[in-house]
Image (cartoon, helix red, strand yellow):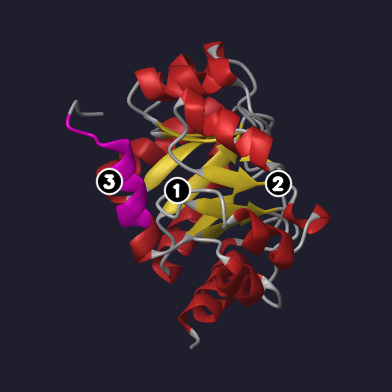
Amino acid sequence: MTDRFDPHAALATAVARCPLVAILRGVRPDEVVNMADALIAAGFTMIEVPLNSPDPLASVALLAARYGSDVLIGAGTVLAGRDVADVRAAGGRLIVSPNVVPDVIRAAAAAGMISLPGYFTPTEAFAALDAGAHGLKLFPAEGASPAYLKAQRAVIPAHVPIFAVGGVTEENLGRWLAAGADGAGLGSALYTPGIGAQELGERAANFVRCIARP
């Protein structure tokens, strides 16, 4: 990781290339590279390994070493500030949380990493931004609606990237983007433990085709 890494610019660049975050919950280190290769071949540029996966820091380290600055690699389900340093030491640049924990957000910002905390209400959104978040994750999106996000977009600054996460599918991805989401995090609709790299690549390509449609 270099000192020149700019979290805001890196996130904007990744979103411009492909606004989808692959959430590999449950992936093992012995398979993670094959899975990531399939995702990247489909066009993905952001990969998250949740910390409740088997040996997640080993997976983060393998991916960070393989892809360097070409892909944003990081950890999800980051619940405590102390975990941020471990992810950074493994080479991760992205910290994703399901909730707004100021200690996690501040630790990520201080470490020069991208912070994407989960929020549900405008109060939580602005608390996250005040703590230094670089973007927001509407979670669980399946508990809200595109109309709900569109209403929030009237008050959340337009320059703040928002990702819809939780229940996003090929069928509804376009509605989320039309409502104001800058991107989406894809969990079980994309990856489930036990899936093969070929099938993952096909699913990933289908999602990429969804965002390419007019």
Task: Kindly indicate whether the residue at mark 1 contacts the one at mark 2 (C-beta within 8 angstroms).
Answer: no
Q: Nearer the viewer, residue 187 or 105?
A: 105
Going by the picture, which residue comes out furthest to the bottom? Answer: 214
Q: Nearer the viewer, residue 63 or 194?
A: 63
Q: Which of marks 2 and 1 is in front?
A: 1
Identify residue for label 1: 160
Q: Earlier in the sequence, mark 1 or mark 3?
A: 3
Q: Earlier in the sequence, mark 2 or mark 1?
A: 2
Dot 3: within a 10 Å radius of its alpha carbon, few (fewer than 14), some, or many (20 or more) residues? few
In magenta segment, residue 99: no
Identify residue for label 2: 139
Q: Nearer the viewer, residue 46 or 214?
A: 214
**Up/down of 185 relative to 171, above or below:** above
Tell me residue 73's x, y (percent): 42, 41
Identify residue for label 3: 9
Task: Kindly indicate whether the residue at mark 3 contacts the one at mark 1 (C-beta within 8 angstroms).
Answer: no
The reply to whether residue 186 is visible in this rendering is no
Which of the 4 quarters of the picture holds residue 113? top left
Going by the picture, which residue comes out furthest to the right? Answer: 143
What's drawn in magenta, residue-wise?
A: 4-14
Task: Identify which amino acid the numbered label 2 is placed on.
Answer: Phe
Task: Give me the C-alpha separation between circle 1 and circle 3.
Answer: 12 Å
Task: Identify which amino acid the numbered label 1 is placed on.
Answer: Val
Task: Give me the C-alpha separation between circle 2 and circle 3.
Answer: 23 Å
